[in-house]
């Protein structure tokens, strides 16, 4: 099996410390967790009438392919109480996204949000965008 390396973005603005901790525990149990970035508080994007977010990232290795990993991340979000509402920028218990897949940026938000770039560089020093 091929081992893939991914940077996962984590964010929450509903009990963020608790929900991010729970997500990290699940991810650590299922994948090879190599490194955890520092977490930062960020203002909401798109829908401003909500609490700030706590955001950071994880560097993992997995034998899953990108599609299977994305499905598993959605399952973890659901298990942690994420409700997919019409407003995709609304409050959430947890948001898990694949930011980098095998050295390639796969989420366009990385180019728009400085905190995502900072987390990636913290996990992979010298990473170029």
Image (cartoon, helix red, strand yellow):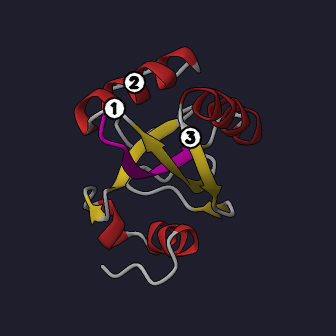
Q: Where residue 118 sits: x, y (%)?
A: 52, 75
Does the rendering let one see residue 82? yes
- Circle 1 Cα neighbour tier, 10 Å, few/some/many (<14 / 14–19 / ≥20): some
Q: Residue at x 30, y 72 (%)?
A: 111
Q: Is residue 30 left or right of residue 16?
A: left
Q: Secondary structure at mark 2?
A: helix
Numbered tag placed on residue 2 in the rendering: none
Q: What is the quadrant of residue 57 in the picture?
A: bottom right
Q: Residues within 10 Å of mark 2 (few under 14, many from 20)?
A: some
Query: Does the magenta portion include 3?
Result: yes
Q: Which residue is mark 3?
A: 32
What's the distance in space between the residues labelled 3 and 1, CA to CA?
A: 12 Å
Q: Which residue appears at 40% of the width and 51% of the height? A: 6
The residue indicated by pointer 2 is 72
Circles 2 and 1: CB atoms closer than 8 Å: yes
Task: Please name which of the two marks, 2 or 1, marks the residue nearer to the observer.
Answer: 1
Which secondary structure type mostly characterizes the magenta part of the structure? strand
How many numbered marks does the figure carry? 3
Work out how far the residue at label 3 is from the one at label 2, CA to CA, in angstroms: 15 Å
CA distance separating discs 2 and 1: 9 Å
Rendered position, 71 above or below 28: above
The spot of residue 20 in percent (x, y) is 66, 39
Q: Of the two numbered discs 2 and 1 on the same chain, state the one appearing first in sequence.
A: 1
Q: Residue furthest front?
A: 1
Q: Is residue 69 magenta?
A: no
- Circle 3 — which element? strand
- State which tag comes first along the sequence, 3 or 1: 3
Circle nearer the N terminus (3, 2): 3
Query: What residue did someone put label 1 on?
Result: 64
Magenta segment:
1-11
* Residue at 46% from the left image edge and 66% from the top image edge: 116
Could you tell me residue 42's position as x and y percent? 59, 62
């Amino acid at each position: 099996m091929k081992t893939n390396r991914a940077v996962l973005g984590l964010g929450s603005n509903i009990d963020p410390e608790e929900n991010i901790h729970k997500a990290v525990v699940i991810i650590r149990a299922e994948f090879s967790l190599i490194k955890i970035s520092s977490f930062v508080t960020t203002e909401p994007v798109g829908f401003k009438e909500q609490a700030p977010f706590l955001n950071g990232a994880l560097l993992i290795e997995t034998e899953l392919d990108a599609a299977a990993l994305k499905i598993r991340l959605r399952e973890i979000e659901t298990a942690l109480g994420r409700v997919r509402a019409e407003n995709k920028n609304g409050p959430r218990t947890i948001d898990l996204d694949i930011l980098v897949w095998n050295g390639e940026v796969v989420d366009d938000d990385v180019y728009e949000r400085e905190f995502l770039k900072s987390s990636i560089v913290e996990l992979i020093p010298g990473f170029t965008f």
